[in-house]
Amino acid sequence: MPDIYEAIKADHDDHRALLDRICDTEGASDDRQAAWSKFYYEVKSHAAAEEETFYSKLISKTWGQDVARHSVHEHQELDDLMEELNGMDMSSADWLEKFGKLDHDYRHHIDEEENEVFTQARKEVPEDEIDGYGERFLARKREERDLVDKKTARSLED
């Protein structure tokens, strides 16, 4: 079973590949729609699981509070962009422009996590305190996947 860092990094690698795939598509093609849908559900469930497992652990440490808040704030900004994109025509110039922003911002976010947050966390959080968090993350992500539509509907109602 992967540790929390490996589990999150594997998701990030999948997300990068999906972003690349979306970039290689045109208009509202079936391929773009399929890649977008997979990206949307994967990132939504990933972010929720990451916040509930990894970032909840970091926020319990004084040094990690600002880091966790920053990352959770970025998750919200990215979520807002994804919701906007979800309601737009994929073949429009506006969709492409907004997707370009999402692509840039998300890659920046995951690079920051992998290169800065993980480095600090590995130094500060003893392995025995985070042992089993990779399994927790993956299990929570599976549960969260089934809640994405329900949460989105509730959010739109508010």
Image (cartoon, rainbow, N blue to C red):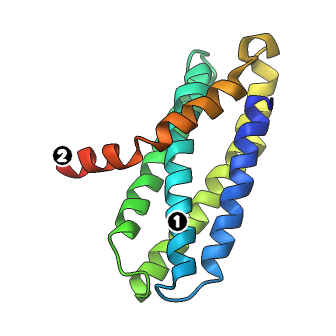
Mark 2 closeness class: few <14, some 14–19, many ≥20 residues within 10 Å: few
**In the image: residue 153, left or right of residue 127:** left
Say which amino acid is labelled 2.
Answer: Asp
- Picture layout, residue 85 above or below residue 112: below
Q: Residue 92: x percent and y percent? A: 40, 87
Say which amino acid is labelled 1.
Answer: Leu
Identify the residue position indicated by label 2 in the image: 158
Using the rendered view, name the quadrant where residue 8 is placed. top right
* Residue under the point 58% across and 28% down: 55
Using the rendered view, name the quadrant where residue 140 is placed. top right
- Picture layout, residue 110 above or below residue 73: below
Q: Is residue 70 visible?
A: no
35 or 110: nearer the viewer: 35
Query: In the image, which is nearer the foreground, mark 2 or mark 1?
Result: 2
* Residue under the point 64% across and 21% down: 63
- Picture layout, residue 129 above or below residue 19: above
Q: Residue 47: x percent and y percent? A: 53, 42
**In the image: residue 108, left or right of residue 100:** right
Tell me the element at label 1: helix
Numbered mark located on residue 81 in the image: none
Q: Residue 81: x percent and y percent? A: 42, 62
* Residue under the point 74% across and 40% down: 116
**In the image: residue 37, left or right of residue 5:** left
Identify the residue position indicated by label 1 in the image: 102
Of the two numbered discs 2 and 1 on the same chain, state the one appearing first in sequence.
1
